[in-house]
Image (cartoon, helix red, strand yellow):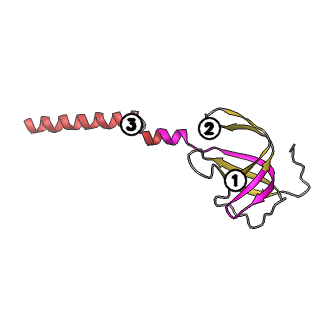
Amino acid sequence: MQRSCVRLSLAVVAVFAIAGCKDKPSSTAAESATTATERYRVRGKIVGMSAEEIDLHHERIAAIRGYDGTVKPMESMTMPFGRGQVSLADLSVGDVVDVQFTVHFDSDPTLRLVAIVKLPRDTKLELP
């Protein structure tokens, strides 16, 4: 009888311990939530290239999340984008493109291409 009570007590403690763990996210889960990537899309003109990245003079981005977590517009500027898994084989300096990218504040490159589509050369961009 005493063994049964001990086993039951241990089982009850284990159930509450597991339930308690589910209520509190682990530090890894909490860190992942703060470094989660968001996908953005913008058009621009390639002004520089290497095997690993492109320099893109992009149009204004209406809303993008910054280092501090605030969402605000980003004016047109030239920025480097890491190529990630995207092929740059058919692209060259001067091409007008539509890109999708993610932002990674916790690692390099910070801006990573997810997709890139070459647009017709006569596409009008809103660049200063």
Name the secondary structure under disc 2.
loop
Q: How far apart are marks 2 and 3 (CA)?
A: 30 Å
Of discs 1 and 3, which sits in the foreground? 1
Residue 39 at x, y percent in the picture: 66, 46
Visible residue check, residue 1? no
Q: Which mark is residue 102?
A: none
Instruction: Name the residue nearer the viewer: 21 or 43.
Output: 43
Question: Looking at this rendering, what residue extends furthest in the left direction?
Answer: 1
- Residue on which disc 2 sits: 67
Of discs 2 and 3, which sits in the foreground? 2
- Residue on which disc 3 sits: 22
Q: Which amino acid does label 1 sit on?
A: Phe
The image quadrant that residue 5 belongs to is: top left
Residue 123 at x, y percent in the picture: 89, 53
Residue 66 is one of the magenta-drawn residues = no
- Residue on which disc 1 sits: 81
Does residue 117 appear to the left or right of 126 in the view shown? left
Q: Distance between the residues labelled 1 and 3?
A: 38 Å
